[in-house]
Image (cartoon, rainbow, N blue to C red):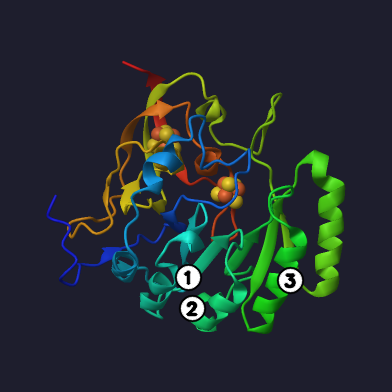
Amino acid sequence: MSSLSTEHKLPEIIIPEDYNYLAFFISLNCNLKCHYCINLNDKNSARKDMAKHHMDGSDWAKAINRLNIGRDDLPVTLQGGEPTLHKDFYRIVNETDDSIKLDLLTNMAFDPEVFIRNVPVKKFTREAKYAAIRVSYHPGYNDIDELIKKTLRMADAGFYVGIYSVLVPENKEHIDDVMARCKGLGIDFRVKEYLGFDGEKWHGEYKYMDAISQHERKSCLCKTTELIAGPTGHVFRCHSDLYANRTPIGHILDPDFRIEQIFRPCDWYGFCNPCDIKVKTNRFQIFGHTSVEIKDIHELN
Ligand code: SF4
Ligand code: SF4
């Protein structure tokens, strides 16, 4: 690998046409501690290992600016953890070229007045049927009254902010109430599908059911349609690799880094993350897409 020089303009990274998601996990730190958090595995290791090492804001902006995305309907999503906790969050946003569309996944830990003062509305404005700033509501962990107040303030300043929450059977009544309240206030509130194991069964539709068994490892070949960069700037094959902090496939600031649309050998089939193998709608609104394609599944050698 060439040295990670950021002094000179970096060569472009061309995003393939069939890529569906560009996820920059700029920080896995979070102000909340949701018990079901997928960023925290059993030993809390991914967050613990990566929390200390963050790429600085100018380097993130350089990394984003070297992407040749080639279309307006594919934003770079800043996420985490809680991405606004990155010490240079506003620098990342403001040093990103205006031609690159940004999305933000947040639990709204930030002060909306500071956000409004520091971020031009155009940074998070694009043509789409859903909000560029998507706020996650975690019942029992963050406060819906505060989220609503902040969302209304952001909307008043011109930002399109949506609130999202996972619908689990035990909080259905509460979520229905919140949805009605948001609707009455003109807030875009949406529910997300519950993914995961509730102790009895898996929720969600998955292309490779035994990929999430979490007990038997197998070998396979795996190809992704997502660019996933972690807090240190390392690029991973998938969410499972990111959260487990497995060996990365490269670094986003490496001048030689390019996206290869290849099947890579993996010995972690069985410990995949639901995000990677869930059946979903792609950006052409066609259902049946999964982030990764897996073949040649066989016993570990
Ligand atoms: S807000 Fe998100 S990242 Fe933070 S603890 Fe909850 S689920 Fe995890
Ligand atoms: S098989 Fe699973 S763990 Fe391995 S690279 Fe693919 S999605 Fe990631």
Residue ID at (48%, 35%): 44
Q: Is residue 163 above or below residue 156?
A: above
Using the image, tell me which numbered label, if any, was put on residue 123.
2
SS at mark 2?
A: helix
Query: Which is nearer the eye, 236 or 153?
Result: 153
Q: Going by the image, does 255 lie left or right of 223?
A: left
Q: Position of residue 288 (x, y in %)?
A: 58, 47
Q: Nearer the viewer, mark 3 or mark 1?
A: 3
Question: Do the numbered discs 1 and 2 sit on residues whose CB atoms are within 8 Å?
Answer: yes
Dot 3 or dot 1: first in sequence order is 1
Q: Position of residue 69 (x, y in %)?
A: 37, 68
Q: Is residue 66 above or below residue 47?
A: below
Residue position marked by numbered label 1 in the rendering: 102
The answer to which quarter of the image holds residue 195 is top right
SS at mark 3?
A: helix
Residue position marked by numbered label 3 in the rendering: 149
Q: Quadrant of the C terminus?
A: top left
Q: Going by the image, does 110 lie left or right of 199?
A: left
Q: Is residue 85 above or below residue 68?
A: above
Query: Which is nearer the eye, 272 or 44?
Result: 44
Dot 1 or dot 2: first in sequence order is 1
Q: Amino acid at mark 1?
A: Leu
Q: Amino acid at mark 3?
A: Lys
Q: Position of residue 78 (x, y in %)?
A: 47, 62
